[in-house]
Image (cartoon, grey):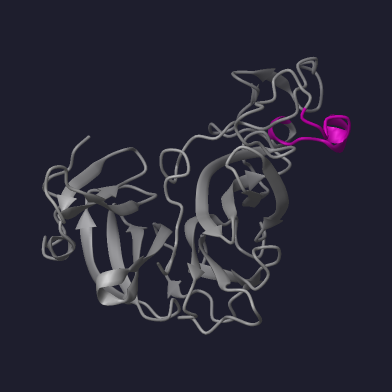
Amino acid sequence: MEGTILNKLIVNRRSFLALAVPAMSQTSPSSPAGGRGNGGQATGGRSNGQPTPQQADLTPEEVADEQHYNQPLRPQFHYTPIQGDLNDATGLIYYKGEYHLFHMYDEWSRLRAAHKRWGHAVTTDLVHWQQLPAVLDTIIDNKPGSGSGVVDWNNSSGLRVGPEKALIIFYTDYQRGTCIAFSHDRGRTWTRHRKNPIIPGAADARDPLVFWYEPASQWRMVRYEKRGFAFYESSDLLQWTWLSRLDGFFECPDFFELPVLNAANERRWVLVDGNGTYLGGLRWKAVHTTNGKAARRIR
């Protein structure tokens, strides 16, 4: 099926991964990195609730001797990058035997401060992971936020070059809007699309979820916009048309279809947001005829 997306790698797109910082239990409170407490986060001296760079940032000296996984506080089953902070699993793709995990990533911080990018790792068995170079850029992409990823199986976008299918990630540029980057080599290198943003507007709008909708042979997108979810359609992944909106949801949408128990051939859609609120039992048509009101929200 076109647009294979591994939306449920653990629980959902916002599944908690492990904090990956060097296991420096002997760091003293007077060191440049600050004290270590609260599960490894820096403490004290915050301004407006935010850590100072001296508290949040890792130094080369701290990580120089920690470039390995034989550490007493290092998770050995759940994926962690070699250094830095990670969260928000995003852009999950399966292609040619590899599961691609992207995630929010700050390579040089304990608390995802000034260096935010997309981390990237692959696995063939969901247990043993290979960390790949980070994707996107802190400055060029304005500390890029969450999104999603697809395999463009039928070259809807026209971006395919060479033997491999185009892998496409949709990400949030907090200054410009929804943008895309694509890969021709199984996700080893990435190129930003020259016509970014594909959907302009970044004022309280983020987290595009893109998937293939088989009944219409089209792509669909659900994007968080100003305390609600907006729905879009596209035939080429580049030009998007607004369909409708549901109010009352917040951040990081997930939208998927499930079979109905004890009802042959019956399926319904479930809409989930970042805090676990969900709207279930939906028919696709009903999503677009509610006049923006999410009347059956369940917590």
Q: Nearer the viewer, residue 89 or 228?
A: 89
Q: Which residues are magenta?
A: 55-69
Residue 177 seen anywhere in this rendered image of the structure = no
- Give the number of marks: 0
Which residue is at a point 18% across and 62% down the rendered structure image? Answer: 284
Q: Is residue 196 above or below residue 87?
A: below
Residue 192 seen anywhere in this rendered image of the structure = yes
Q: Nearer the viewer, residue 159 or 253?
A: 159
Q: Is residue 56 magenta?
A: yes
Q: Quadrant of the N terminus?
A: bottom left
Q: Quadrant of the C terminus?
A: top left
Horizontal placement of 254 versus 57: left or right?
left
Which residue is at a point 81% across and 27% down the rendered structure image? Answer: 32
Q: Nearer the viewer, residue 30 or 108?
A: 108
Q: Position of residue 191 (x, y in %)?
A: 65, 72
In this view, which residue lies farthest toward the bottom?
158
Horizontal placement of 49 versus 298: left or right?
right
Q: Position of residue 290 (x, y in %)?
A: 11, 60
Quarter assignment of residue 205: bottom left
Q: Position of residue 181 (x, y in %)?
A: 58, 69
Q: Nearer the viewer, residue 176 or 267?
A: 267
Q: Position of residue 101 (x, y in %)?
A: 57, 50
Q: Is residue 176 above or below residue 292?
A: below
Quarter assignment of residue 57: top right
Q: Is residue 68 magenta?
A: yes
